[in-house]
Image (tube, helix red, strand yellow):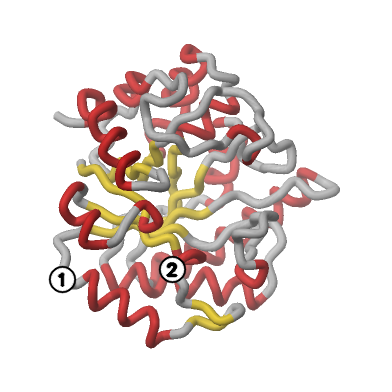
Amino acid sequence: MMIGASSFAGELKELDDHVQSVELYMPKLGVYEGSKLQKERLEMILDELSTCDLQTSMHAHYFADVPTYPKELVVDTASMGEMHFTLMEECIELAGRLGTKAVVMHPGRVGDDREASLKRMVSNLGRLAAFASENNVMIGLENKEATDPGNLCCEAEELLKVVDAVNSPNLGVTFDVGHANLTCEGDSERLAAFVRTISDHVVHVHLHDNYGYWTSNYDGDEHMAPGSGNIDYSVLKGLNGYKGIYNLEVFSMDDVLAGKKVIGEYVMP
């Protein structure tokens, strides 16, 4: 197992000094003009990465309706066209090239018909999982926060329903403890039950903190340093046999360092 951090938390050289892995956040690496991947920009980042002793995970494009997210890179996995598949497949190809441990993907949006959206998402993820198999890549479908009622796969049961329906060895679960805490309304017993339900399917983990309730800031999904909110990180012990990356999905090196201190006793052997 190893501790990692997202690429937006600091420079690669800084991260290299303090964590063992970096999560390359593809929509925010600055490697796109519109929806077109600029390979020269990407190669500059990869050249720098090659000088570091860092494993990688990757965060693929997703749905976001905020000014800070490029609208040309929005992907709703329940409603995908060929341009969206191109974006996601570029991520998978890069992950295969780098030997990336996991590619994180978000579930789609509820839309007008929840069951129809789930059916489309299963079909889309099936195509992406087949492409991931060709590239020797594992996809982790992330649980989302129920404080935004437009999200699919907030509850553990619906998340596993989708994973089971796709039925691919290249699709598992990215467990996001912050999102689960919001879905469980800050209740540590419900959070522990959530962990037990998904434990056998987890291929990747996101760590950050919040207060367990909706706020006007990203529906409560604050992405604070572990220890700043109300999450009981002892629930991580319920991830039976998990040996992968614990990625600190926070926004600064100060938060990475603070988070490492808090989670160390729960994730290190």
Residue position for label 2: 29
Closer to the N terminus: mark 2 or mark 1? 2
Q: Nearer the viewer, residue 15 or 37?
A: 15
Callout 1: helix, strand or loop?
loop
Residue that appears at 42% across and 47% down:
251
Quarter of the image for residue 245 reads top left
Does 156 sit above or below residue 1? above
Q: Secondary structure at mark 2?
A: loop
Q: Where does the C terminus fall, quadrant-wise?
A: top left
Crowding around mark 2 (Cα neighbors within 10 Å: few <14, some 14 to 19, many 20+) is few
Left or right of residue 81, residue 2 in this image: left
Which quadrant is home to the N terminus?
top left
Horizontal arrangement in the rendering, residue 253 relative to residue 8 (left or right): left
Residue 248 relative to residue 185: left or right: left
Q: Residue 148: where, in percent of width, then height?
A: 69, 37
Q: Residue at x 45, y 30 (%)?
A: 209
* Circle 2: residue type: Leu
Label 1 belongs to which residue?
51
